Amino acid sequence: MNGQKGLEETSERLSGQSVKASSITRRILAINVFALAVLVTGLLYIGKYRQELIESEIASLMTQAEMFAAALGEAAVGGENTEQPYLQKIIASQIIRRLTATTRTHAQLIIKGGQILTDSKLLLEPGGLVQIEELPPPNQE
């Protein structure tokens, strides 16, 4: 009977330890599942936030384009008395330069046929373009 009693005590100890281990395992799993849920929720939120930022930037660019078009339409259009109104290049360039200096954007004015009339990156001063010259290396003359 001593052997039987010893077996019962050993099995009670093991079952008590497995209950403790099972409780710890459940807690660890719960913490890991919670951490994973927080990570997934954060990623979904960041994706939505990024999309909203992109949409906001597009709306801002559309507003700027409408402002540019309105300013050019009011001030830089010539030939009102003819059937074919046209853009006056010098005035259009000045307007583009002033508007892009304020908004710090890059703008190109492209006319029918795909020709670039003016480019804000090329405008330096009123009526001036950036001039690029290649210089010889410092040690050569």
Image (spheres, rainbow, N blue to C red):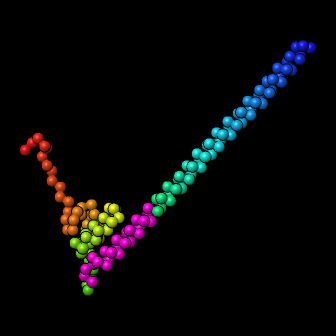
Membership of 47 in magenta stretch = no
User: Would you say 106 lies left or right of 5 here?
Assistant: left
**Residue extent of the magenta highlight:** 57-80
114 above or below 27?
below
**Residue pushed farthest top?**
2
User: Would you say 57 lies left or right of 137 here?
Assistant: right
User: Would you say 47 lies left or right of 87 here?
Assistant: right
User: Would you say 47 lies left or right of 29 here?
Assistant: left
Q: Position of residue 103 (x, y in %)?
A: 35, 64
Membership of 74 in magenta stretch = yes
Q: Position of residue 28 (x, y in %)?
A: 67, 36
Q: Position of residue 135 (x, y in %)?
A: 14, 49
Residue at screen point 77% across, 26% down: 17
**Residue pushed farthest bottom?**
81
Camera sees residue 103: yes
Query: Viewer-proximal residue, 79 or 126?
Result: 126
Residue at screen point 18% across, 55% down: 132
Residue at screen point 49% across, 55% down: 50
Residue at screen point 71% across, 33% down: 24
The answer to which quarter of the image holds residue 62 is bottom left
